[in-house]
Amino acid sequence: MPALRIPGLVRTMNNVRAQLAAGIPAADVDAFRKHVRQTVDDVEQISRTRMRQPSDLASPSYRAFQFLKHLDLERLPIRPDGAPPPPPLHGFYIANLVSICDGLHDDILKLADALADRGGSRQAPAARPTPGDPRLEALRARLAREAAEAEAICRDGGTSPLNLPIRTRRAWQWARFLARPVNLDVHVATVAAAAAIGRPLLAADRRLHERGVRTLTIRLYHSNTLVGGRVEADTYGLRLHQGLMGAPDAVIEAAVHAAFGERWRMPAVQDYGHSAAFHEVMARLEGVAHGGGADGAAVRTAGQATGQTAAQTAAPMLRLPGSAAGVGAVEHREAERETARKGPGIGAEGDALIRDVDGDAADAWALQAASLRATGRHHDLNASFDRVNRSYFGGMMPRPTLTWNTTFTRRKLGHYDLHTDTVMLSITLDDPKVPGYVVDFVMYHELLHKRLGVHAVNGRRRMHTPEFRKAERRFGEWKRVEKWMRGEAG
C-alpha cells in the first residue's frame, strides 16, 4: 500500500521551527498554538477519512507530524514585544554547489576506474594513485576552486560558510577537505578499493539484475549513515561515510558487502566507526570549518592512527524533563576492534602542491561565527562556561567551541562532541523562563564528558559511569536542577 501523503506538512514543520528559533512574539503566541494544534487535527482527520493512520505517512511527513504533535506548546520561546528577531543562521544559499560536488563524485569514480584498469582488471586489487599524477592534481585544483568560490560568495554576502544549509555546508567542507594535499589521494584509493569489491558483487546479484541494474556508482561522503545503497534507474548507488576513507581493506570489504545485503557484516564497520582513525578523519573534515588542521596536513591511514580509543569519541545528549531515560541516561554500546592491517591509503605524504583554500579567511569566519552562535538572546554560553570553569574546574578547563543549536528540541538539552571539541546546547534553554543555574548545569554536564571521556567496561561503552554520576552531583544547584527537570518549581 502506498504511503499516505499530505502536501505541505514538512514545509509547515520547517516554518514552525524557524519561528521557534526566532522566538514567538508575545502577541502571536495564541495564534501560533492554534496553528500547530489545527495542523495536527487536520492530519489526524485526513488519516481517518482515508481509513489510514498517521504512521502510514511517508517518513519525512510522519516525522513532521510527530514533531508538531509532541511540541510543548506551554513552554515556547517568547520574544519580548518590540525585540527584533535574531538573524537566521541559514538564510544564505549557494546555488548548485551540491550538484557540482555530485559531478566531482562521478569524476573521482572515473579516476578510480582508471586506476583499476591500470591494475589489469576491475576485479583485481585496486592500484594506489601516484602522488603528483596530473589527473589527481586537476581534480584537486577543481575542488580547491569550488571551495574558494563558495567562500568568496559567502564573504561578499557578509556571512560564513558555516551558516549555509547543512547539505551545502557539507559540500563546501568536503571540497575544501579534499583540496588539501594527500587527502584526495587516500579518498580516490578508497573509492577504487570499494569499486574493485563492489562490481563483482553487482555482477552476481540476481535480484538487481532482474530490476535492470547494470551499473555501480560509489560515493564517499560526509553523511548521517555509515553504509547505504539505492537503486536509481539502471544504477546501484553505493554510499560510504567519509570517515571510512583510508580504512583497512577488511573494513571496506565488510562495508561494501553490507551495502549488498550482508547485514551481518555491519558490526565490523560499526566498530571502525568508533575507532581513532575514523574520528581523526572526521575531526579534520569538520576542522576545515573550525580553524583546525595545519597547512598541508592530511588524514592518516589506519596504520598511522593516534592512540585515541573508541571509548574517547562522542558523548550522548542530555534530555529534557519527561524523558523516560531520565537526566542524561543514554548509553551507547560498541566494542572497539583493533585493526592492524593498513588500508588503501598511501604511505608518503608527497609534495604539498596545493595549500589550504583561503585558509586564514575561513578560519577567521569560523571563529567569528562560533562566537556569535554562543551568544543567545537570554543566556551567553561563554559566560556560562566561565562560571562553570571557575567554580568546578579551577579555571583550568580549555575552552571548547561553544554553540547553541539551530532548532528547537523537545527533549535533548546538550551534547559534547569530542572529535570537534564542541559543546552544543539546545536553544530551548535560551529562554528567560529557564534559570541560569539550569544552563550552567547542562554546561557542567557536557564539560564532565570532556574531562572524563568515555570508558569501556566489559566491552560496553559507558559515558555515565558511577564516577560521572558522583561528579555530576557536586554541582552546587543539583537539587534545584532535579526539581526543574521534573517540571517542579526550582
Image (cartoon, rainbow, N blue to C red):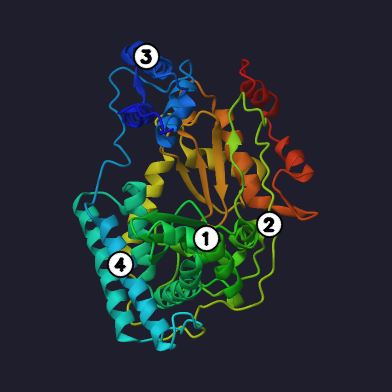
User: What residue does disc 3 label?
Assistant: 38
**Regarding mark 2 in the picture, which secondary structure is present there?**
helix
Question: What amino acid is labelled 3 in the image?
Answer: Gln
Q: Residue 475: image x %, image y %? A: 69, 34
User: What residue does disc 1 label?
Assistant: 260
Numbered disc in front, either 4 or 2? 4
Q: Upstream in the sequence, badge 1 or badge 4?
A: 4
* Separation of marks 2 and 1 at Cα, in angstroms: 30 Å
Residue 291 in view: no
* Separation of marks 4 and 2 at Cα, in angstroms: 35 Å
Numbered disc in front, either 1 or 4? 1
Question: What amino acid is labelled 4 in the image?
Answer: Leu
The dot on residue 104 is 4
Q: Could you tell me how many numbered marks the image carries?
A: 4
Callouts 4 and 3 close, C-beta under 8 Å: no
User: What residue does disc 2 label?
Assistant: 311
Q: Eyeballing the image, is 405 above or below 409?
A: below
**Regarding mark 3 in the picture, which secondary structure is present there?**
helix
* Separation of marks 4 and 3 at Cα, in angstroms: 45 Å
Question: What amino acid is labelled 1 in the image?
Answer: Phe
Quadrant occupied by the N terminus = top left
